Amino acid sequence: MRILDLRLRLRALGASPDHEARVLRQWVNAQPQDAGKRRLSDFLPLALRNALPQVTADLAGLATLQSEHPGEDGSARLLVALNDGQTVESVLLPRDGLCVSTQVGCAVGCVFCMTGRDGLLRQVGSAEIVAQVALARSKRFVKKVVFMGMGEPAHNLDNVMEAIDLLGTAGGIGHKNLVFSTVGDHRVFERLPQGPVRPALALSLHSTKDALRRELLPRAPRIAPDELVELGERYARATGYPIQYQWTLLDGINDGDDEIDGIVRLLKGKYALMNMIPYNTNEGLGFARPAPEKAAAIARTLQSRGVLTKLRQSAGQDVEGGCGQLRARSVDGGAV
Ligand code: SF4
């Protein structure tokens, strides 16, 4: 379901733009119906007031919690059912963040990621993306939303942009706290600068070598690393927030000196932050993470050579909630 459909439904029930904004605000902020001195329904025209319980129930049905898997670091993987029975996963992150899913499955098929193993099953509607935020907010405070869960946001651009617009307005989330994460796609660089809400951008780089990157991200759009960084730099300068480059460290594959030199060549002097994320184990994919000392040395070297670098551990790895570990699971926890 799209937010546009919801807006049309509210308008058909007699909602003015102000009524519409109130209903959407209450939903995306997970405020109870009787919040404040006066209830939301007191402000609404009769037809909408009468229909509100059903509208509210329908919105709650867009994303329902099937199971919750708390990690030791304060994160929690949430298995969420959409209203057709498909499932996605959201991850509550430490420090008031939430990672949401934008597709059931994924067509990019990155070789180190579980999400794309079965390809794309379906798009997640904009209202379903926002519903993941509303669900999370019914559990805890959320002030940052990253679009890094299941799916490639660029392959579901209309829905993701619609969700971003609502989260950055009625949802009260600061625009740089909305993080659009992509393998890179020309449509992203055309659309994002035009929106009323311009999110921060995370670009999955993973290699500075075009041929290796094509192997690791087999169905990503054909954009060479140099061009990707140029496009990113333009967006960073236009928005005033740095590009967050993502790099899954794979032992013996993209952790060599040649890649360090390549990163320095591409990113030194750029408005950018390099996030080095040691690979999260997925059984059967045949990759390993480099030794901790090696990963730390890579980050230190980059930093000393002028590339702002953070070595990050994915939140929620112990509950399979880390980068590359999300998938459409059945309620009993197995992959569907
Ligand atoms: Fe898709 Fe992201 Fe997984 Fe790649 S890493 S297959 S883009 S979900």
Image (cartoon, rainbow, N blue to C red):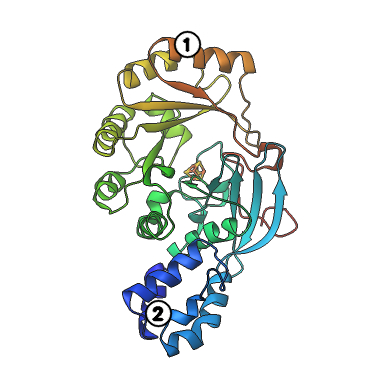
The image quarter containing residue 185 is: top left
In the image, residue 172 lies at what x, y percent? 42, 54
Identified at 28% across, 54% down, the residue is: 196
The residue most toward the right is: 332
In the image, residue 154 lies at what x, y percent? 38, 49
Q: Is residue 190 left or right of residue 286?
A: left
Which mark is in front, 2 or 1? 2
The image quarter containing residue 285 is: top right
* Secondary structure of residue under mark 2: helix
Nearest to the observer: residue 269 or residue 203: 269
The residue most toward the front is: 37
Disc with the residue nearer the chain's start (2 vs 1): 2
Residue 77 visible at all:
yes
In the image, residue 246 lies at what x, y percent? 46, 32
Name the amino acid type tagged 2.
Answer: Leu
Identified at 61% across, 50% down, the residue is: 327
Residue ID for mark 2: 10
Residue 291 visible at all:
no
In the image, residue 16 lies at what x, y percent? 33, 79
Name the amino acid type tagged 1.
Answer: Thr
Identified at 39% across, 24% down, the residue is: 208
177 versus 16 height, above or below: above
Residue ID for mark 1: 301
* Secondary structure of residue under mark 1: helix
Identified at 48% across, 60% down, the residue is: 130
135 versus 225 height, above or below: below
Alpha-carbon span between mark 2 and mark 1: 55 Å
Q: Is residue 131 left or right of residue 320?
A: left
Q: Is residue 226 left or right of residue 129?
A: left
